[in-house]
Image (spheres, rainbow, N blue to C red):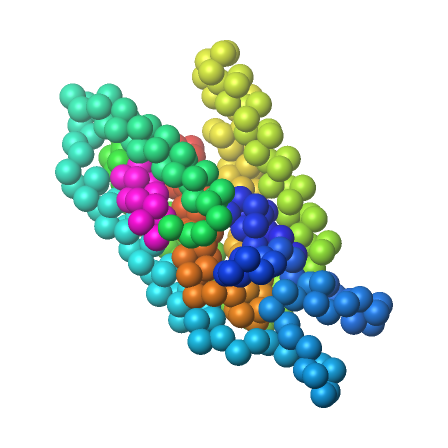
Amino acid sequence: MRSSNPVFSRRGFSRDNGHAGFNAAPQAGAAAAGANPYATNPYAQQDAQLGAPQAPARTDAMTIDDVVTRTAMTLGTVIAAAAIAWWVMPVDEANLGSAYGVAIGAAIIGFVLSLVNSFKRRPSPPLILTYAAFEGVFLGIVSNIVSMYVAPGAAMQAVIGTMAVFAGVLIAYRTGLIRVTRRFYGFVMAAAIGFMLLMMVNLLFAVFGGGDGLGFRSGALGVVFGIVAIVIGACILALNFKQVEDGIAYGAPREEAWLAAFGLTVTLVWIYIEMLRLVAILSGDD
């Protein structure tokens, strides 16, 4: 099962030394249909006597602790950079233009680094942390602007909302309330692609027609689309959890924990931005 997160969808967890990479999770009912278990699990090995697939013995296999540690480092970098940008970059009326310029520049650099990290054959911790730093600068400035001019306390509300979504999806996934199946994957992918295309059209109308384009990001319609975006982000988060779980089960190398951390960070940043936008819209309506 490939994730709709661009980090995970390009390639799953790979294996060192030229072996086949992890590109798909085990399919439900594959064994019942007579499918070869090694086609979906590149890390499985055939037991010579029992004929049962077994995970290879690895001393450098990725664990959940590795994923948690790398994710904490990546998100910690985002938070630290955001806090520094919040306090260092003034957003008063005299410096508002400069603040917007820095935020846009950081966002562009962060986007480029996200593409570089997504298409690298091996995870690069320095590049991932650099992406996190620039993303943090962007989030810090934008959050400060929204909190000062639109909705005081919006940043904290967005942080709490993002944490609630993360905790809720994790609990639902671990308890089986959310089951990542092929149908679930297809639905999320279709919804994410459709949403992104619609937002691109809205952006084009905003650029060439002025205002808020088609009005998808303001007013009552903006609230609806904000909620939809957060729900899609939550679904992608479930796909991320599934991908990480499968990578650990397949014995992916420890360095791939950085890939997991990067993918989770991308998803959480998306959810936070949509939360911040939703809070701003609701506060503006008041």
Identified at 40% across, 67% down, the residue is 66
Vertical relation: 213 (above or below) 165: above
Q: Position of residue 233 (x, y in %)?
A: 52, 48
Taking the view exactly as shown, the residue that stands out farthest to the right is 33
How many numbered markers are drawn?
A: 0
Give the quadrant of the N terminus.
Answer: bottom right
Give the quadrant of the C terminus.
Answer: top left
Q: Quadrant of residue 51?
A: bottom right
Q: Main secondary structure of the magenta part?
A: helix
Q: Quadrant of residue 92?
A: top left
Residue 268 can be seen, yes or no: no
Vertical relation: 45 (above or below) 114: below
Q: Is residue 235 magenta?
A: no
Residue 174 is left or right of residue 190, and the answer is left
Taking the view exactly as shown, the residue that stands out farthest to the top is 209
Residue 146 is left or right of residue 170, and the answer is left
Q: Position of residue 173 (x, y in %)?
A: 57, 66
Residue 121 is left or right of residue 38, and the answer is left
Residue 258 can be seen, yes or no: yes
Q: Position of residue 194 (x, y in %)?
A: 64, 35
Residue situated in front as seen by the camera: 2 or 102: 2
The magenta segment is 125-138
Q: Position of residue 3 (x, y in %)?
A: 59, 51
Identified at 64% across, 75% down, the residue is 45
Q: Is residue 126 magenta?
A: yes
Identified at 57% across, 76% down, the residue is 56
Residue situated in front as seen by the camera: 116 or 280: 116
Identified at 68% across, 82% down, the residue is 47
